[in-house]
């Protein structure tokens, strides 16, 4: 729980955010940071911060902290997408043609994105609800201490 206190301390420096705003930043940063495409998470987090009026540096920080997890989950997302579409895993041809290789990469990316959609919605909702609950309890305790 040290990271929650550190996040609250940082967010207080940005203008005392509500527990809901902090939970939104973390939940969206994690969910969008797991998007299985190289540059897209940064752009998606920036867009979410602008649309939802969240703190852009804070959501990008969470996005960058989740980056190793994005790389680690790329293969499981591809495999889950293959199962969702009942597709055989893409095998590398012996003598690949450029178009065939590009089609295999595109298909794998589409399957990974579909799997990400299936996983990210419940994960984001669960993360938001849990963090909101924890942060509200911490803020109530802090208010009662004064």
Image (tube, rainbow, N blue to C red):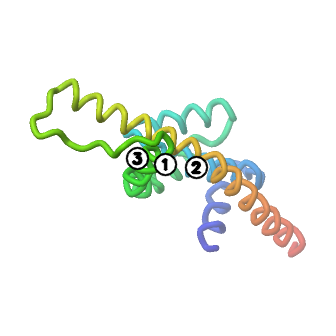
For the residues labelled 1 and 2, say whether their Cβ atoms are less than 8 Å apart. yes
Residues under labels 1 and 2: Cα distance? 10 Å
Compared with residue 124, is residue 101 higher up or lower down, i.e. above or below?
above
**Horizontal and vertical percent for residue 119?**
58, 49
Q: Going 39% across and 57% down the picture, which residue do you hit?
A: 72
Q: Is residue 60 left or right of residue 26?
A: left
State the SS at label 1: loop
State the SS at label 3: helix
- Which numbered disc flags the more N-terminal residue, 1 or 2? 1
Q: Is residue 50 left or right of residue 79?
A: right
The residue under label 1 is 34
- Which numbered disc flags the more N-terminal residue, 2 or 3? 3
Q: Going 81% across and 62% down the picture, which residue do you hit?
A: 136
- Which numbered disc flags the more N-terminal residue, 1 or 3? 1
Dot 1: few (<14), some (14–19), or many (≥20) neighbours within 10 Å? many
State the SS at label 2: helix
Q: Is residue 74 left or right of residue 93?
A: right
**Horizontal and vertical percent for residue 84?**
51, 44
Label of residue 119 in the image: 2
- Decide which of 116, 66 is in the foreground and name it: 116
Compared with residue 120, is residue 99 higher up or lower down, i.e. above or below?
above
For the residues labelled 1 and 3, say whether their Cβ atoms are less than 8 Å apart. no
Dot 3: few (<14), some (14–19), or many (≥20) neighbours within 10 Å? many
């Amino acid at each position: 729980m040290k990271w929650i206190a550190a996040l609250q301390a940082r967010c207080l420096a940005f203008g005392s955010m509500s527990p809901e705003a902090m939970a939104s930043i973390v939940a969206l940063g994690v969910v969008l940071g797991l998007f299985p495409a190289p540059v897209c998470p940064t752009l998606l987090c920036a867009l979410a911060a602008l649309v939802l009026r969240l703190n852009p540096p804070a959501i990008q920080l969470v996005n960058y902290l989740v980056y190793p997890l994005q790389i680690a989950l790329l293969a499981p997302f591809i495999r889950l997408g293959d199962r969702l579409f009942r597709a055989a895993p893409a095998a590398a041809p012996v003598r690949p043609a450029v178009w065939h290789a590009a089609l295999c990469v595109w298909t794998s990316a589409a399957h990974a994105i579909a799997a990400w959609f299936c996983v990210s919605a419940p994960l984001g909702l669960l993360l938001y609800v849990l963090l909101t609950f924890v942060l509200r309890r911490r803020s109530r305790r802090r208010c009662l201490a004064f």
